[in-house]
Image (spheres, rainbow, N blue to C red):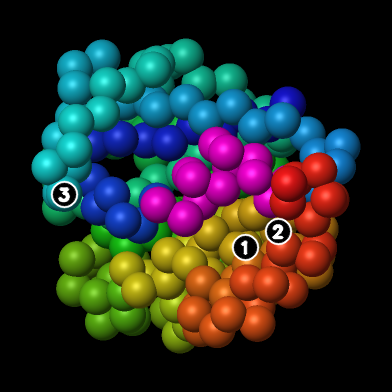
Amino acid sequence: MFTIYIYVLDTLADWELGHVTSELNSGRFFKKAAQPVSIKMVSHSKEPINTMGGLTIVPDCLIDDIIISEKNMLLLPGADTWNDPIHHNIIGKASEFLSLGATVCAICGATAALANFSLLDERPHTSNGLGFLEMVSPSYKGQNFYIDEPSTADNNLITASSTGSLLWAKQIIEHLDVFQSDTLDFWYKYFSTGKSEYFFALMQTLPSSTIN
């Protein structure tokens, strides 16, 4: 089983997680024999957090409860509160994940948090723009590794800009290998274009029992 730890913090940009959490939680497009996925909301305390969209999330566990394993994954969403020192512990945990070969996925403001701890200095990555990282992370030295794309995957690090949540979700799902490749291809084409032919092509990749 994969355990996906999602760090939740006040002002969390809830829409950035929508595609990836709904697909991993529902498993509606999973291939046969795909490993089950457990999603755990983790935070620095058990107190409820309020997202940017006004939703309330109650964490499932604390940072100290995280089990670091190559089969587990840490997701860091965007938020306006990443500069608060209270979040330093989760970035330390992200560093442990990366060192072990476990996967860290960061989007929007979370990429700046990684940059502030020099975790992007020698790894291909993206963000809301090179100028954004240079502005909000004075210690950032990863300019030569910056990739100007909405989302980019490099081994066990998947990073995205605030506009790259759909591609970020695709790359996370691909890394976990829980979709058939054609299912994932048509899923991405449908949600990125809205063309109905891709929806029907997506449905055709699924077992008949799933469609019924």
Give the Cα separation between the discs numbered 2 and 3.
28 Å
Counting other residues with Cα less than 10 Å from the Cα at mark 2, is it few (<14), some (14-19), or many (20 or more)?
some
Q: Which mark is residue 171?
A: 1
Q: Is residue 153 left or right of residue 125?
A: right
The overriding secondary structure of the stretch rendered in magenta is helix
Say if the magenta span includes residue 8: no
Residue 53 circle label: 3
Q: Position of residue 92 (x, y in %)?
A: 41, 35
Amino acid type, label 1:
Gln
Taking the magenta stretch, the answer to whether it contains residue 20 is yes
10 versus 184 height, above or below: above
Pointer 1: residues within 10 angstroms few (<14), some, or many (20+)?
many
In the image, residue 147 above or below residue 184: below
The image shows residue 117 at horizontal and vertical percentages of 36, 50
What residue appears at the point 47 percent right and 55 percent down from the top-left corner?
19
- Residue in view at x 25 percent, y 28 percent: 57
Residue 96 shows in the view: no
- The residue under the point 73% across, 46% down is 212
Furthest-front residue in this view:
212
* Residue kind at label 2, given as amino acid type: Glu
Is residue 80 at all visible to an observer of this figure?
A: yes
Magenta residue span: 18-30
The quadrant where residue 162 appears: bottom left
* Closest to the observer, 39 or 112: 39
Q: Which one is closest to the eye, mark 2 or mark 3?
A: 3
Q: Mark 3: which amino acid?
A: Gly
Is mark 1 in CB contact (under 8 Å) with mark 2?
Answer: yes
The Cα atoms of the two marked residues, 3 and 1, are separated by 25 Å
Whole-percent x, y for residue 76 in the image: 40, 46
Disc tally is: 3
Residue occupied by mark 2? 174
